[in-house]
Image (cartoon, rainbow, N blue to C red):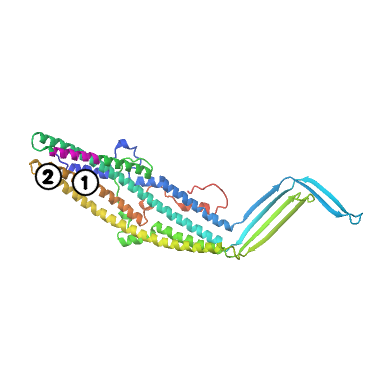
Amino acid sequence: MLRFGAKHLVAATAAALLGAVSPWALQAAQADTLDGALALAYRNNPSLNAQRAGTRAIDENVPQALSGYRPKVNITASGGEQSLSTTTKSPSSTTPGASVYSTSSGYNSPFSVGLTLTQTLFNGYQTANKTRQAEAQVLSARATLATTVQNVLLNAVTAYMNLLRDSAILDLQKRNVEVLQEQLRQTRDRFNVGEVTRTDVAQAESSLAAGRSQVLTAQANFEASQATYRQVIGINPGHLAPGTPVDRFSPHTLPGAVALGIGTNPAVASAEFNVDVALRQVKVAEGALLPNLSLQGSVQKSWLGVGTLATMESYNASVLGTLTVPVYQGGAEYSLIRQAKETLGQQRLNLDVTRDQVRQNVVQAWGQLQAAKANIEATQAQVQAAEIALNGIREEARVGQRTTFDVLTAQQTLVNARVSVVTAQHDRVVASYTLLAAVGRLSPEVLGLRVPVYRPQVHYEQVRDAWAGTRNPDGR
C-alpha cells in the first residue's frame, strides 16, 4: 500500500525551507543565508555600483558652481618671426613741391608674455543660485541611490526566495513521479489479476506522463531562478538556508505604514529635491536680467613689438572694472525664464504623483503581506486535509469503492496543495521585504547586514572645496 504521508510532508516542508539545491548544478556555496546574499548584492551588484558612480559624478556639480566665486587666471605667451617692409612718403626739403620716398625693411623675432586675472564681483546672484541648485542635485542623487539600494536588495530577496521555492517544487515534482511510478506498477499488477480494467492502467500512465512533464517545467523554472540569482547576487548559489520575514522593522498598522512611506521613502525625497533644483533654475534664469560686474587685472611684457621694427621693449599693466547692464538680448533670456517656470510646475506635479504612487505601493504591499500570512495557514490546512483524503480514497479503492482515477486525482490534489504551501512560504517572506521597501526602510543599516555601508557624504566632502587636481578620490 502506498502512503504519501507524514514522512513525505516533513521532507517536502524541509525542501521548501532549506532549499536543497542539486549539487551538480551549483558551485561551492558562498552565500548560504539570505543576509549573506543581500550583503553580496549590496557590495557587488553592477547596477548599484553604477548608480554610486553616477552619484559621485553629480557631486562634481557643486565645485563647478563654486568656481564662479573664484578668480580665473590665464598666462599667455607669443613669439615668432616677422619680415617687415615699409615705404613712406615725405615732402622734399630741397625741392619745393617734390616728395621723397624712403623704404625700411628688416627681420626680427617679437616675443611677449602676459598674465590676466579676472574676478566676477556680481552676476545677478547666478553663482549663489547655481551652488544651491547643485547641492539640491546632490541630495536628489543620494535619494535616487537609496531607491536603487532598495530595488537591488528587494531583487536579491526575490531571487533568493524564488530559487528556494523552485528547488522545493522541483523536489516535490520528482517525489510525485516516484509515487506515480509505484501507482502504475500496482495498477498493472491488479490489471493482471483482473481487479481493474485497461482504462485504469491508461489513466495511471497518463498521470505519470503528466507528472514527468511537470518535472521538466519545474526543472526549467529552477534553472531560470539560478541564472537570475547569479545575475543579482553576483555568484553562483550554494545550499541556501531558509529566509525569514522582517515584519519587526515595519509599522504595525496601515495608517502608520502610509505615513512612514510618504515621510521616508527615498523616491519622495528625490522628487522634493527635484523641485528645489527647478526652483533654483528659475532664479538662475532671472539672474541673466541683472547687471554683471567684474574686475580684470593684466600685465604684459613684450620684446621687439609685432608690426614694427622700431620698438625694442614694452611693458603695460592695468586693473579695469567692467559693468555690463543687459538691455535686450533677442528675447532668449525671457524664454528661458518661462521655460524654467514650466519645469518647476512639472516637478511639483511629479512630487504629487510620487507621493500618490508611494501611498498606493504601501497599501498594496500591506494587503499582500496580510494575504500571505493568511495563505500559509490555509494551505497548510489544505495539505492536511488532502493527505487524509488521499489515504482514505486509497483504502476505499483497495476494497473496490473507489476507482484508480479517484486515487490519481487525490494524489494530484495533494501535490498541488504542497506546492501551494511552498509558494505561500515564499510569498510571506517576499511580501515582508516588499512592505519594508515601500515604506523606505529596506537598507543595510536597518537589516543589520554585515557589510561596509557606502557613505556618499564622504566623496562629496572630498571634492566640494577642491580648487585643483584631476585625480578622483576613492570616496572612503
Place of residue 174 in the rendered image (x, y in percent of width and height, measured from the top left): 23, 39
Nearest to N terminus: mark 1 or mark 2? 2
Q: Secondary structure at mark 2?
A: helix
Place of residue 80 in the rendered image (x, y in percent of width and height, measured from the top left): 72, 45
Report the residue at 63% width, 53% height from top: 73
Asked whether the viewer can see residue 175, the reply is: no
Hey, what amino acid is under mark 2?
Ile
State which quadrant residue 221 falls in. top left
- Indicate whether 186 appears above or below 93: above
Q: Which mark is residue 393?
A: 2
* 202 horizontally vs 140: left or right: left
* Crowding near the residue tagged with mark 2, few <14, some 14–19, many ≥20 C-alpha atoms within 10 Å: many
Give the residue number, with chain letter if any, for mark 1.
Answer: 416
Q: From which residue to which does the magenta span run?
A: 199-214
* Crowding near the residue tagged with mark 1, few <14, some 14–19, many ≥20 C-alpha atoms within 10 Å: some
Hey, what amino acid is under mark 1?
Asn
Tell me how many marks there are: 2
Q: Secondary structure at mark 1?
A: helix
Q: Which mark is residue 91?
A: none
- Indicate whether 292 appears above or below 177: below
Report the residue at 18% width, 46% height from top: 413
